Image (spheres, helix red, strand yellow):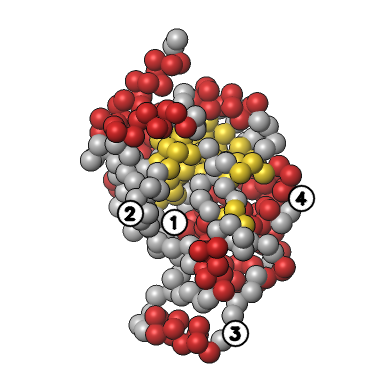
Amino acid sequence: MKIAHLILAHAAPAQLSKLISALEYRDAWFFVHLDRKADIEAFSFLKGRERVMLIPDRVDVGWGAYSIVEATLRGFRTIVNSGIDFDYLNLLSGADYPLQSPSDIHDFFARNTGKNFMEYYSVRNEWTEAIPRLTEYHLTDYNFPGKYLVQKWMNRLLPTRSMPEGLEPVGRSQWMSLTLDAVRYVLEYLDGHPMVTKFFKLTWAPDEIIFQTILYNSPFRSSLVNDNLRYIDWSKGQASPKVLAEEDLERMWASGKLFARKFDLARFPEVLGEVDRKIQDHHYK
């Protein structure tokens, strides 16, 4: 069971190193996309690590912009073109961390071969707060003076946007674990449907919708499992999830998930130490 962990990172080199160490395994490879704004010298330690590759041609990633989709797609292409016959691609951020041992994670995917794990809720019926992302024009991916004024007038004067290619929109969390066949399908679909790329470049936070929508409207729909395998705490109702601390450990373990986010090694170093100890104790029982 060969797994390619695709990690999107922009800071905290020590935490990224710890994440990779926690997932190292004989059949695990790591493909790291570093935000173009990041100081690559701070991550120079990656160049000498076994089975760790940096994604070339880095993207300047903006929050809520299509650029994060572009960074992910460059990772997808690098992994598909690596020549390694991977079974799964596991998309992580540098703020994620496993809740189970590498061998247990690989065993899980071996038992669930062919399934694709992601959150996908109907935008029209379940995740209705996302509707304006698709019906309005968003210039988040662009940077020029007066862009918000232009965006405002676009939404006043232009017709309401509608989904291209008759796609039924679904989505939620961007973090997912996909078979390599599903990843290849996404790349081939976008190569053959430039209007879909054009549409999502004007969508706010398209990374939470584009991949799920493509696979939901494809022959892969029957393989989808509506579970991204991540413990994430949105209870504070903010734009970003809660940074996890020791008080969250019991809920993390009770979730049965493979991964959790998000963590901050600088602020709460003790929580990752507790996670490591728990995984080790469980693994050697």
- Ranked by sequence position, the earlier of labels 3 and 4 is 3
Q: Nearer the viewer, mark 1 or mark 3?
A: 3
Residue annotated with mark 4: 219
Residue annotated with mark 1: 58
Please tell me in which quadrant of the rendered image residue 186 appears. Answer: bottom right
Please tell me in which quadrant of the rendered image residue 285 appears. Answer: top left
On screen, residue 248 above or below 163: above
Residue annotated with mark 2: 38
Whether the residues at callouts 2 and 1 have beta carbons within 8 Å, the answer is yes
Distance Cα–Cα, label 3 vs label 4: 32 Å
Residue 209 location (% of width, % of height):
57, 58
Q: Amino acid at mark 4?
A: Pro
- Which quadrant does the N terminus fall into? top right
Q: Is residue 279 visible?
A: yes
Q: Nearer the viewer, residue 67 or 105?
A: 105
- Ranked by sequence position, the earlier of labels 4 and 2 is 2
Q: Residues within 10 Å of mark 2 (few under 14, many from 20)?
A: some
Q: Nearer the viewer, mark 4 or mark 2?
A: 4
The label shown at residue 159 is: 3
Q: Residues within 10 Å of mark 1 (few under 14, many from 20)?
A: some
Q: Is residue 95 visible?
A: no
SS at mark 4 in the image: helix
SS at mark 3 in the image: loop
Residue 230 location (% of width, % of height):
48, 39
Q: Amino acid at mark 1?
A: Arg
Q: Amino acid at mark 2?
A: Ala
Kindly identify the residue that appears in the image at 55 percent across and 63 percent down: 128
Q: Disc count in the image?
A: 4
- Ranked by sequence position, the earlier of labels 2 and 1 is 2
